[in-house]
Amino acid sequence: MNPENGGNLPPDPLLNEGMDPHPAPACRRCRRPLPGGRLHGNCAACLLDLAGDTEVLDRRGAERIPERIGGYELIAPIAAGGMGVVYRARQEGLGRDIALKLISAGRLVRPEQVQRFYTEARAVARLGHPHIVPVHDAGEDDGRHFLAMPLLEGGTLADRISGLPPQGTEERLETAARWMSVVARAVHHAHQHGVLHRDIKPANILFDTAGQPHVADFGLARLLDEESGLTRTQALLGTPDYLAPEVARGGAAESTVASDVYGLGAVLYELLGGSPPFSSPTPLETLRRASEERAVPPSRRGPPRDRRPSGAERRLDLLCLKCLSARPADRYASAAEFADDLDRWLRGDAILARPESLSETLLRHTRRNPYLTLALLAFAAAVATGVAVTLSQARANRLDLYAADLHIASESVTEGDLGFARELLDRHRAPSPDFAWRLLRRMAEGDPRTPVDRHPWIVNGVAFSPDGSRLLSASVGSGTVGDALHLTPLSPDGPTRSLGTNGARSLAWFPDGIRFLAAHVDGRIRTWNADEGRVVSEVSGYSAAMSTDASTWVTCEGNPFPWGSTPAGPTWLRHPGSGAPARRLPDSRTVAVSRDGSRVAVSDAITVIHILDGRDGSTIRSLESQGRLWSLEFSPDGNRLVATGWRPEVRLWNLGEASDTPRLLSGHTLSTWKAAFSPDGLRLVTSSSDQTLRWWDAGSGESLGVARGHGGEVWCVAFSPDGRQIASGGKDRAVFRWPSAPPRADLTLPHRSPLRPVFSEDGSLLVTLPGTGADPGSRIQSLSEPTTASAGPHGTPLAIGRNGDWLVQERPGLLAWIPGGIAGATSRILELETVGSTPPNFLQAAVSQDLRHFAAVDAEGGVKVWDTRDGRIRHRTRIPATLVAEASFSADNRWLALAAEEHGAWLVPIGGGEPRQLDRHLDQVRSAVFSPDSRILATASVDATIGLWRVPGLEPVALLKGHRTSVDAVAYSPDGRILASLETGTGVRLWDMSTFREVATLPMPDAEHWLRFSPDGRHLAVQTASGVRLLSAP
Amino acid sequence: MPTHRKPEFSATRWSLILDARGGDEAVALQALEELCRRYWYPLYAYVRRQGRDPEESADLTQSFFEKLIEKEWLRSVSPEKGRFRTFLLTALGHFLSNDWNRSRRIKRGGGRTPLALDALEAEERYRLERAETVTPETLYERRWAMTVLEGAFLALESECGASGKRALFEALRPHLSGDPDAAMFADLAPPLGMTEGSLKVAAHRMRRRYGELVRAEIGRTVDDRAEAIDAELGHLQEVLRG
């Protein structure tokens, strides 16, 4: 069935005009022909009139409808709104039908209102734009004012939204962009003529019968509200969903071009996201949210999807959100600019819209947290005079784009959409990329794999030849393009050979390694000779399965798509030699054969799976399929059966058990398609739309690991016969080979102590503390050779030299230098101040980068800084007693920063002087570190923000928001370009320090307390519940 | 486990579906399915009118409902209150468009047990239609209006049946739309055991009740406002007069 051809079918004779030889009887009352059938001889029109009896109209009370007004005959109401009711009306004399808007009684009373109404109506009447609904006539009859307009019969945009294709589909995005471009240009035309719309909403956008949008009700609706003396609160009893916040606050007088742009954005938002941006149960709540909140991108609104938003959709999000900026100045400067950006988007060109600026973030923050206002005003001033202004606008735009793209790339990596992440990151390839780019690019690269082949379309099947020397792969195209059957030599490597342009879904080799079966999408199952590249024989069917020795093969003529409109089809057990049908099996859509041919599984793919005897086709048992399925696979011993398709869980039956309930293997996040057992039957690999391959223990069903690398859905997977590699293919058109074991996750080193691990000064080693208690021991891990680790000396490491040739440790009451390699004897000991025989109890200690200073803070708030060359205390001071979470030196050795739980952060001058308190955070400060150039102090607070402060004045530079609960640690990359922050239980975020934007969100639910960059900038070490995880960015 | 009653007929309303989307989706789905059952014939007529043959038309209508009853379609319905009639036709338009079908093929789109529509009955009904030189859209709207009227008839019939007035209903049924006719009342009254006068009153009541039921039926397909019912009624009156 092909709908586009439907129109070409010969017309049904009954449809032809004038073919009815028996005219129907007519209604005695209205003389219309009576319809036959189910109305029992009644006249439809007259029946309907029973429902529109005068009694009904009376219920409208005061709104009795006159029959004619101002030379128009009212026919029927077609819509009702705040202004009044719109009627279909006939213009007397001309006989044409128009739309007549009858202004509700009482809406226009005072003479100046009336005058203003007609002035505005005349202005609109002069607009003359093909997409603005013109006002033909405005007048008054017996005290009722009306407007006459052409009748547009295609409904309103409000009517059409619910019938749009599902959210996120290309058709929906394009329709929305096209409509809004037309609407925005019409609105712009009005703006150029001095007419504001003031009430842009879906109900005011009308469609003609050709499906073109027209903007109606320019200026008039809100004018009425304004002029009728309604208070603002009353005016807001209508929907403020599309109302710019400044208009909501200040009244209609605040209407500007920018507030119309807001309205356009809000309508686009609804078209994309299914509902207006801040829609809330009460208008006041809507207004509050519109002024205080940032709209969620429309792509994230609406029903949960099985696909993530595309790059194009995310760009359209940006475009839409720009219109919705709280500050009018941040929106498009005109409706035309908005239309231009929409057109650029439609053409696939780069758009101008960028994510919200920092100043806007600050502005919102000010509104939300009045207590912070002063601090934030200072921020804004600092931003205005400092960093931001020094950047040219073009550079700022470029940096903004960089930050935005990186952030999207990080989300894509998290979601597993590596293809899109790679595409975004590669746009910003630079000679010396920063840590965030390098880390994300490494993550987006996915796991180690070898590209084998590229297909013209989606790869549906892969199969290794029995000796593993060749790989067969097939793609299934769309219509006439994209079908392909490829053969690639693997050992030795050789060029891929094309075996024609027939797409296939299932592939199976004969034991001779020369012939193979391919179930082609044209409904033929062909036996090929791979060497000669020709078809040997063929039978009909859509899928086929064969035992390893080719003694049992089964073909199925059912369409594999399990929908009611495509019935299950005849299924045959065939003679091994001739391929002639031997026995008919139950009708099915998908089939499987065990390796030894003793068992066959056939399924209608909807309800039932029959396990049959492979020799005589007799039924062994039947299983409920537990939902629709796409493919079935037997384990090598035939005792397990796995079903995949149309749901994320993999269904695994143990046929040796009596239970008919399969074990559900959960891990994939989207539908699974194909499963393959390792030849030893111990492991199972599955492919999924979530772009991953997943390994499972075939016995226990436990998840063993996951591999990422495909840039799209993975539709097929196969094990090599020796079990040493697997092959996969999918929607990115690529075929890959992978190691047969799942890839290792990021390196995690044992570390259980609350004390912090230390990188060596060249970043080649990391000292961790695997034990707990007072002496956790130490472990020295080589980062260049991940398998090399050695036990280190006991004590708390503070610093370690290049190649580990010296180590500085804090021991109770002592600071010890251990030169000449890790195992060397202690060369020098600095005795720290002791009280009697009790060694000092330091809460936090730190050593400066040049090792000249050692600082420690005790529980009473005592702060001491030693000169390590002579062991003398160089500075002694005190802060109020509190728990100190972190102490760190600035690189220029002038400052010590302390993160204190109760009294904010402290900046202690090493050369002497009073500590300066930073008390602008709303809650505890958990971490305080200096930028590598010592000019900025970064603080992480439980108030969920990160503050950046100028040293030494502590003037605010920026406030980074994005964390949700508390920020527990911050660290600068050695080049100062990236700041990393950690939220316990959530993960790590990376911030770009030229724009102060978040560039990556790395979810790590087990992250806790602490993170640090290696001095060479290649690793970010993050403490987790299971040890120190190294995020490496080569 | 208590047995579930089928939702009351009166519970099946477009506005309730719109309201229920955030909450009990199963209820909303069931209500949508119920509404689809009632209003599928206008869609069949529309597809058929576009020149497609009976099998294809039945197939398309059926597939359309399958798609429609999938959850995401329901969820994608805008809370903007609209009319079920326009919603269905717009959605069908998208469904029939080329692009949509192609994308469905590529995405191996979802599915659901189809709404069982009786294709033969549909075609029989369609063949009873007079040959009209109208557009598919107009035909759709007329069939929609007819379906509303038929729905009200069924409701009236069951009401009368329940209150023991089946004979009265059957006697008056063919004359509901006509002008009062003295001769008719004189003929009908004796077999019903009624006087001519009481039959006239009963007829008046029945007509008024029918009018209310038509409004109620329209109310199922639009949002709750009285104006919305009036606007839809006005539109359907136009359609039938046109």
Image (tube, rainbow, N blue to C red):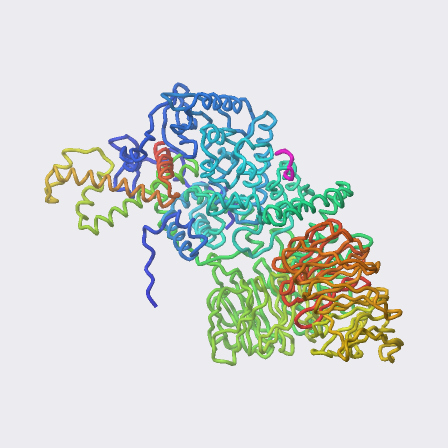
Instruction: Inspect this view and state whether residue A758 appears.
Output: yes
Left or right placement of residue A853 versus residue A319 in this view: right
Q: Is residue B64 magenta?
A: no
On screen, A479 above or below A873? above
Question: Which residue appears farthest toward the front when viewing the image?
Answer: A836
Find residue A495 and report its horizontal and vertical position in percent. 77, 62
Find residue A444 and report its horizontal and vertical position in percent. 71, 59
Left or right placement of residue A486 versus residue B179 in this view: right
Question: Which residue appears farthest toward the top when viewing the image?
Answer: A93
Q: Quadrant of the C terminus of chain A?
A: bottom right
> The magenta stretch spans which residues?
A329-336
Of the pair A452 and B236, the residue shown nearer to us: B236
Q: Is residue A335 magenta?
A: yes
For residue A266, which quarter of the picture?
top right
Instruction: Inspect this view and state whether residue A24 appears.
Output: no
Find residue A643 and report its horizontal and vertical position in percent. 54, 69
On screen, A159 above or below A514? above
The residue at 60%/52% (across/down) is: A309
Left or right placement of residue A82 versus residue A976 in this view: left
On screen, A822 above or below A341? below
Q: How many marks?
A: 0
